[in-house]
Amino acid sequence: MFSRLGKTDKIRAGLKRSRDTWVASISRLVRSPGLDESLWEELEEVLILADVGVSTTASLVKKIRSQAKDKHLSEPSEVLDVMRDEIVEILQSASSKREIYHSDASNPNVILLVGVNGVGKTTSIAKLAHHFKQRDHKVLLAASDTFRAAAIDQLSGWGQKLGIDVISHGAGGDPAAIAFDALEAAQARSADVLIVDTAGRLHTNSNLMEEMKKISRVLSRIDPEAP
Ligand SMILES: Nc1nc2c(ncn2[C@@H]2O[C@H](COP(=O)(O)OP(=O)(O)O)[C@@H](O)[C@H]2O)c(=O)[nH]1
Ligand SMILES: [Mg+2]
């Protein structure tokens, strides 16, 4: 118990440290006099160090700079207000574009789990399936991890426990063909959600990445919105 609390405290302290660092850097920037090239460079550095990402940082700083010019801003503190508005806009447009769940009866929501071996794809599928089922959504699972018979048994086991059907062709089957059949079955049965399990892969496994592209390709033949 105590060691657990200790761990949480450590994580909290770590998060606080990183928040303090970038909040402190921004406050320092805002107090600096005048808007010059070094301010934009420092702002870029602070945002990248705060894990905003290189391309988002570049486009954010570009937008802030052009607004600062248009509005004839001269104080770094005014830049902070512009930055806040721009960040809110980015977050709002991202959340409106990423609708995770739609309720269109003829088109099931398709969730495709991808990741390296053992990261918890199959376990997460069981959790997601349970989550949706509890909310009265009809769920179907596709056993597209055909690498090992054990992987199919694992998914089927979860299906049995949860009372959810699993579409499978058995070990060695074509993962894309299974995904295709499963999506057809999901449409025919008016399922709300189809969750597709896949074999573990690294992005450097070119044959497995081709296999993933094929899964995506055949799914989009049935539903262009599918992953
Ligand atoms: N501690 C912990 N173990 C997990 C979690 N998710 C999965 N596991 C375990 O990690 C192992 C691999 O999980 P699995 O779902 O089969 O991974 P997959 O290879 O990505 O499908 C199994 O023994 C799971 O019980 C988790 O959130 N926490
Ligand atoms: Mg698995």
Image (spheres, grey):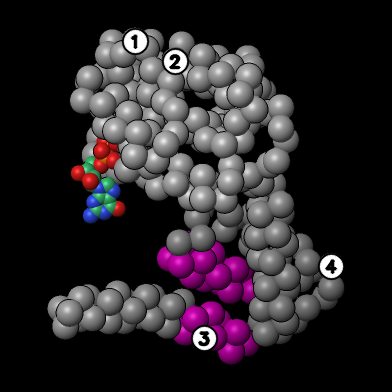
Query: Nearer the viewer's eye, disc 3 or disc 1?
Result: 1
- Which of discs 3 and 2 lies nearer the camera? The answer is 2
Q: Distance between the residues labelled 4 and 2?
A: 55 Å
Identify the image quadrant of residue 119.
top left
Q: Which of 202 and 37 is in front in this view?
A: 202
Residue shown at the point (50%, 30%) measured from the top left? 140
**Labelled pair 1, 2 in contact (Cβ < 8 Å):** yes
What secondary structure do most residues of the magenta stretch adopt? helix
Question: What mark, if any, has residue 178 been given in the picture?
Answer: 2
The x and y percentages for residue 58 are 59, 55
- Circle 1: residue type: Gly
Taking depth in this image into account, of 209 and 126 the one nearest to the observer is: 126
| Percent coordinates x, y for residue 170 in the rendering | 31, 13
The answer to which of marks 4 and 2 sits earlier in the sequence is 4
- Identify the residue under disc 1: 173
In the picture, the disc for residue 70 is 4
